[in-house]
Every structure is written in structure tokens, then in C-alpha cells.
Amino acid sequence: MNGIPHVKSIHKTRYQILLALLLEARTAAGMTQKELAAKLGRQQSFVSKTENGERRLDVIEFMDVCRVLGADGVGMLRRVEGATAESSLLYLLTRLAAVPSHNAGVMRKKIRSYRAPLSFTAC
């Protein structure tokens, strides 16, 4: 095990892309995990566990996070929906180069946990 729990889900790759987009949005907003959590009225561990894939966001939580970050949630979902398995890994790799060093560990864990699906079709 590499630190991220193995999630048995046909949607794992797309969810990892969504998490990468949320991390990117938080970084672009100039917020720390602690600052985001405070604005959401949550503990810092909520943001940490979400970004690490240990905890999944429900739709309402996703909307709240996007609102606080000033991020386009619909645009994020469109980007996720249009992703293919190959572009998903490529996206994660290119994002690793763009994130600040204190967030790079999260991205490295996401990349190490990548398991290519046998086939990928958007729902």
C-alpha cells in the first residue's frame, strides 16, 4: 500500500482528476488547507483527507468548496467528464510540475496510486 487507500471504483481516475482540479483551485486562490477549512466551518483534516483521497466529497460539499474558492464547479466537472484514461495520467503528471513543493507530495501520491482501467468510457 502506498499511503492512499485502494478505492474499488470504476470512477477512481475521474475522481482523482477532480481532486487535482480542486487542489489547483485552492492553490490558485492562495489558500492553505487550514484557511479553506476555516471558511467552510470544518477542521483542517477535512480538507487534508479530501485532497488525499481518504474522504470523498458529496455534491453539496463540492459546491461549498467551489463557492469558497471562487472556482467554477461546472467547468471542473466538464473537464473531468471529457477526460480519458491516458489524458488523466498525463494531466496528473503535468500538474505535479505546477504545484508548490508543499503540495507536491499529495500529487505524487495520486500519481503512484494511478491504475489504468481496462477501458474507460464517460457516462
Image (spheres, grey):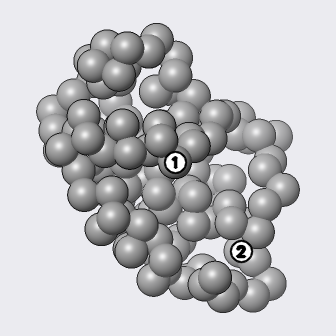
Viewer-side label of 2, 1: 1
User: Residue 12 sits in which quadrant?
Assistant: bottom right
7 and 99: which one is in front?
7
Q: Amino acid at mark 1?
A: Val
Residue 75 at x, y percent in the picture: 30, 68
In this view of the protein, can residue 106 be seen by the observer? no
Which quadrant of the rendered structure holds the N terminus?
top right
- Kindly tell me whether residue 45 is visible in this rendering: yes
Q: CA distance from mark 2 to mark 1?
A: 25 Å
Question: What residue is disc 2 on?
Answer: 116
Residue 59 - label:
1
Q: Which amino acid type is shown beneath numbered disc 2? A: Ala
Classify 45 as above or below 67.
Answer: above
The location of residue 52, given as percent across then percent down, is: 56, 37
Residue sitting at x 47%, y 57%? 18
Residue at left 57%, top 51%?
A: 110
Label placed on residue 23:
none
